[in-house]
Image (spheres, rainbow, N blue to C red):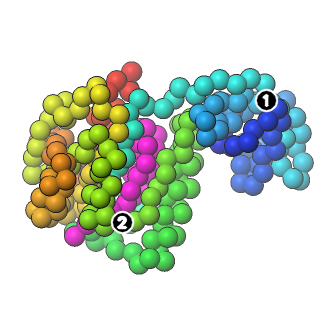
């Protein structure tokens, strides 16, 4: 069943904008067909299309239930910016796997270093990709894509987390020795194509980040975040 996000949903709701165009033009849906609207309270609204007009798609709520599709752990991915469109793939797949939020980070070895104007445009595009991935994977939330930041600002955010984990090519502890059932908010850091500088590792460790390994093989910058996130979901029982 097709999945969309909306708020202020009453007994009826008018879907407008890109979602309405997608329903009518791409999906070619018609009156009597059903869709699901999910609101910011993580409530699923099963809706039937009542009318299609130039103003949008009017739906009637048939039933409501709690959305149970979110992981039991909130994982925020602090991902070093990668070259080309690799970051778009990371965002799309991370949202499907269950990431709670993503913070693009500029580290010393990042090749891509967009200026403020380009960063703003990229952030908007990344957020749209996250929204589309959230609809496709039937998430209860649309993960937020934060503004681009540097590592110093990123570590200042760690006080809000139960645990911070640095996935480091230089080695670390197995993830199963770091993750505990009581962890509810986890921050994970992954590096750019050239990896982290030693001083960056030391900075993260000074803010209580634990270094972890994803095995003996060296993973690409766009592969490591997805493997790390999948491993956390596995160890916390969110792939069952």
Going by the picture, which residue comes out furthest to the front? 159
Residue 97, horizontal then vertical, whole percent: 42, 38
Q: Could you give the CA–CA distance between mark 2 and mark 1, rounded to whole angstroms?
A: 41 Å
Residue that appears at 87% across and 53% down: 55
Q: Which residues are magenta?
A: 87-108
Horizontal arrangement in the rendering, residue 157 relative to residue 214 (left or right)? right
Residue 58 to residue 131: above or below: above
Residue that appears at 19% across and 48% down: 209
Q: Are marks 2 and 1 in contact (CB under 8 Å)?
A: no
Query: Where is the N terminus found, in terms of image quarters?
Result: top right
Residue 59 to residue 22: above or below: above
Residue 152, horizontal then vertical, whole percent: 26, 65
Residue 56, horizontal then vertical, whole percent: 83, 49
Chain-order first, disc 2 or disc 1: 1
55 or 136: nearer the eye?
A: 55
Residue 109 lies within the magenta run: no
Residue that appears at 87% across and 43% down: 52
Density class for disc 2 (Cα within 10 Å; few <14, some 14-19, many ≥20) is: some
Q: Which mark is residue 61?
A: 1
Horizontal arrangement in the rendering, residue 94 relative to residue 56 (left or right)? left
Can residue 222 be seen in the rendering of this structure?
Answer: no
Q: Which mark is residue 218?
A: none
Horizontal arrangement in the rendering, residue 27 relative to residue 74 (left or right)? right
Q: Which residue is mark 2?
A: 149
């Amino acid at each position: 069943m097709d999945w969309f996000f909306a708020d202020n949903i009453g007994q009826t709701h008018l879907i407008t904008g890109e979602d309405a165009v997608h329903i009518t033009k791409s999906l070619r849906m018609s009156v009597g067909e059903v869709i699901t609207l999910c609101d910011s309270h993580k409530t699923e609204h099963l809706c039937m299309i009542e009318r299609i007009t130039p103003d949008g798609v009017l739906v009637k709520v048939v039933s409501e239930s709690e959305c149970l599709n979110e992981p039991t752990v909130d994982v925020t991915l602090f991902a070093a910016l990668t070259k080309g469109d690799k970051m778009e793939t990371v965002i799309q797949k991370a949202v499907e796997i269950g990431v709670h939020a993503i913070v693009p980070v500029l580290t010393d070895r990042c090749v891509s270093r967009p200026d403020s104007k380009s960063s703003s445009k990229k952030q908007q595009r990344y957020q749209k990709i996250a929204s589309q991935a959230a609809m496709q994977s039937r998430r209860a939330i649309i993960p937020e894509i934060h503004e681009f930041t540097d590592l110093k600002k990123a570590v200042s955010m760690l006080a809000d987390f139960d645990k911070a984990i640095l996935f480091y090519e230089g080695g670390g502890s197995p993830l199963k020795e770091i993750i505990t059932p009581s962890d509810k908010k986890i921050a994970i850091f992954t590096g750019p194509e050239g990896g982290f500088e030693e001083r960056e590792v030391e900075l993260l460790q000074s803010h209580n980040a634990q270094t972890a390994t994803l095995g003996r093989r060296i993973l690409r910058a766009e592969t490591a975040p997805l493997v790390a996130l999948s491993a956390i979901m596995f160890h916390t029982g969110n792939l069952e």
